[in-house]
């Protein structure tokens, strides 16, 4: 088994390549991002200061000058505190898929209170949320929690339109979270619509789906820009957690993406047990690249069994209205469908690639969207 000499990605990772030094293409991609954003350097700091100054100038006279999505997790909580420290006036925005843990809900309360920041929360109807999750479970695709990511993104864009705000700050760090392998998953608004149409039991009335038209409207008419400040900073998740705990009373929720029960089920039960997908290698590879932990230790952790909340499976069964037999039949069916079995906007995104390249360069869409959604997949 060939393993990267810098991180822990191996030859089973989709679309991976190794150079003559045994370094994988994902590590080289991180090096390119480092060269572009200069995190932790004087150049990176100056670039971030320039962005902050622009946000302040364009937000002058408004109650809020930016939107910041919060989940109760480490990155978004820390970024909210930093944004206020920088003198920005963010409106904290949360999409409640009704599967939040009590810890994440309390974290949002504590951090927004500490920052004296207003909070706008959009709550989907809980039965509708359960039906959408159930649809993805019955479809037997790996993207069980796709509706949360798409819904959250649309709520952020809707909030920008409602409050006439042009900037969204995203708490994402490629240094801490790593580079997710291309080909592992895919989702968009059409994908959610098609799966729910085939497997859903109730109409989608309160779910904020992102259609292609809504996406374009936000990009062209509202001209929303997405900024990732952590990309310019020498960001350490461990240090951020320590700071948040000390200053705000924020609590750790047990692991990457475990602040929500849907994502917790996805990462610790559904994908590992049904699809053999263990996404712990994303953050572990990132930690090894940065030298936060020895590469050998990262490999050792990755090869240990995943810790599972003993109550999560029963919770999921109850929320989705599944009997033990129905749940077991799906988990053990051997059926493994993918996004390629359903309708998506993928071909349209590829056709519009030149347009989205310009939009990515002007921060109208995340650069990660352009790189992952607008090029044909090698595994397609």
Image (cartoon, rainbow, N blue to C red):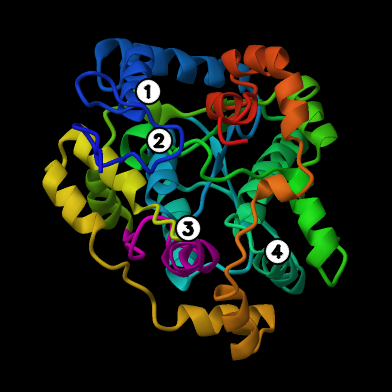
Instruction: Report the front residue among 51 and 194.
Output: 194
Instruction: Report the front residue among 51 and 188.
Output: 188
**Residue 139 marker:** 4
Q: Residues within 10 Å of mark 1 (few under 14, many from 20)?
A: few
Q: Is residue 120 visible?
A: no
Query: Residue 60: percent from the left, percent from the top?
Result: 61, 21
Q: How many marks?
A: 4
Q: Is residue 75 left or right of residue 365?
A: left
Quarter of the figure that contains the N terminus: top left
Vertical placement of residue 332 versus 117, above or below: below
Tags 2 and 1 touching, CB below 8 Å: yes
**Which residue extends farthest front?**
1
Q: Is residue 364 left or right of residue 28?
A: right
Q: Is residue 21 visible?
A: yes
Q: Is residue 18 left or right of residue 276?
A: left
Q: Residues within 10 Å of mark 4 (few under 14, many from 20)?
A: many
């Amino acid at each position: 088994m060939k393993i990267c000499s810098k991180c822990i990605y191996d030859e089973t990772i989709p679309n991976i390549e190794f150079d003559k030094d045994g370094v994988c293409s994902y590590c080289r991609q991180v090096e390119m991002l480092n060269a572009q954003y200069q995190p932790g350097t004087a150049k990176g700091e100056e670039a971030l200061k320039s962005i902050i100054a622009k946000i302040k100038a364009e937000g002058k006279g408004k109650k809020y000058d930016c939107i910041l999505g919060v989940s109760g997790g480490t990155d978004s909580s820390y970024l909210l505190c930093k944004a206020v420290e920088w003198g920005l006036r963010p409106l904290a925005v949360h999409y409640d898929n009704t599967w939040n843990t009590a810890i994440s809900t309390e974290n949002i309360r504590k951090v927004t209170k500490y920052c004296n920041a207003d909070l706008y929360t959009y709550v989907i109807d809980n039965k509708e949320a359960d039906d959408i999750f159930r649809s993805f479970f019955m479809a037997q695709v790996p993207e069980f929690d796709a509706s949360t990511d798409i819904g959250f993104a649309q709520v952020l864009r809707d909030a920008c339109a409602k409050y006439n705000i042009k900037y969204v700050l995203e708490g994402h760090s490629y240094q801490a979270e790593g580079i997710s392998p291309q080909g592992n998953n895919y989702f968009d608004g059409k994908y959610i619509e098609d799966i729910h149409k085939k497997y859903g039991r109730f109409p989608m009335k309160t779910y904020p789906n992102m259609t292609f038209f809504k996406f374009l409207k936000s990009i062209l008419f509202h001209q929303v820009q997405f900024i990732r400040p952590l990309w310019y900073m020498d960001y350490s998740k461990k240090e951020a957690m320590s700071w948040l705990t000390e200053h705000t009373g924020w609590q750790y929720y047990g692991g990457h993406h475990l602040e929500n029960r849907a994502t917790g089920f996805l990462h610790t039960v559904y994908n590992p047990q049904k699809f053999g997908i263990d996404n712990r290698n994303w953050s572990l590879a990132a930690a090894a690249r940065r030298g936060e932990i020895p590469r050998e230790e990262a490999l050792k952790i990755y090869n240990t069994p995943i810790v599972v909340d003993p109550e999560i499976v029963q919770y999921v069964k109850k929320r989705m209205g599944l009997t033990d037999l129905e749940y077991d039949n799906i988990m053990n069916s051997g059926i493994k469908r993918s996004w390629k079995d359903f309708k998506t906007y993928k071909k349209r995104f590829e056709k519009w690639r030149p347009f989205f390249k310009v939009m990515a360069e002007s921060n109208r869409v995340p650069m990660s969207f352009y790189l992952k959604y607008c090029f044909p997949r090698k595994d397609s």
